[in-house]
Amino acid sequence: MTTKHNKLVRSKIPQMLKEKKIPYKSHIASQAEYVEKLYEKLLEEAIELAKDRNPEELADVLEVIEAIKVLNGWTTEEIEVIRLKKLADRGGFDQPIILEES
C-alpha cells in the first residue's frame, strides 16, 4: 500500500528510501512549486512544534526558515537587524502579556 504525500521533503529522503528498498515516486519542483511547498512546509513544521513542543521540531522549523532565507536572498545579519529593531520598538515575546481587547 502506498501513501500519497505531495510535500517537500529533506534532500536525503529519496536516497534513504532507496537504501531501504522502499518504492517511492518524486519529482524536482519548478521554482513556483518549490516556493509554495516551502511555505506549506513552514506551516506544517510550526504546527508540529506547537503540538509536540520539542527541540527536534524547533530544529525542523529553523531548517525551513534557513531555506526561505536562501530562497529570498536574505542574510542572517539583515534579518537580525530587523528583529532587533522590532524588539527595541515593540518589545519581544518574553512576557506573558495577553491583549484581550483593543
Image (tube, rainbow, N blue to C red):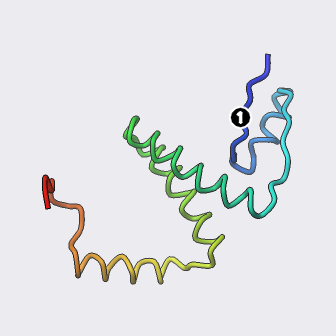
Whether residue 96 is visible: no
Q: Please state which amino acid type lies under the numbered disc 1.
A: His
Front in this rendered view, residue 102 or 72: 102
Task: Identify the residue at image location x=15%, y=59%.
Answer: 95
Q: How many marks?
A: 1
Q: Is residue 66 positioned above or below 16 on the image?
A: below
Q: Is residue 91 positioned above or below 88 on the image?
A: above
* Position of residue 60 in the picture relative to residue 9 (left or right): left
Task: Identify the residue at image location x=26%, y=76%.
Answer: 87
* Position of residue 44 in the picture relative to residue 94 (left or right): right
Q: In the picture, which quadrant includes the C terminus?
A: bottom left
Task: Identify the residue at image location x=63%, y=56%.
Answer: 38
Q: Quadrant of residue 67?
A: bottom right
Give the residue at the far front of this rendering.
102
* Position of residue 89 in the picture relative to residue 79 (left or right): left
Q: Is residue 48 positioned above or below 94 on the image?
A: above
Give how far across and how far down residue 89 sits, in percent.
Answer: 23, 81
Label 1: state its secondary structure: loop
Q: Quadrant of residue 82?
A: bottom left
Q: Quadrant of residue 1?
A: top right
On the image, numbered disc 1 is attached to which residue? 5
Front in this rendered view, residue 26 or 99: 99
Q: Residues within 10 Å of mark 1 (few under 14, many from 20)?
A: few
Give the residue at the far top of this rendering.
1
Give how far across and how far down residue 57 sits, in percent.
Answer: 47, 44
Give how far across and how far down residue 63 sits, in percent.
Answer: 56, 57
Give how far across and how far down residue 27 sits, in percent.
Answer: 85, 47
Task: Identify the residue at image location x=83%, y=26%.
Answer: 22
Whether residue 49 is visible: yes
Q: Is residue 96 positioned above or below 49 on the image?
A: below
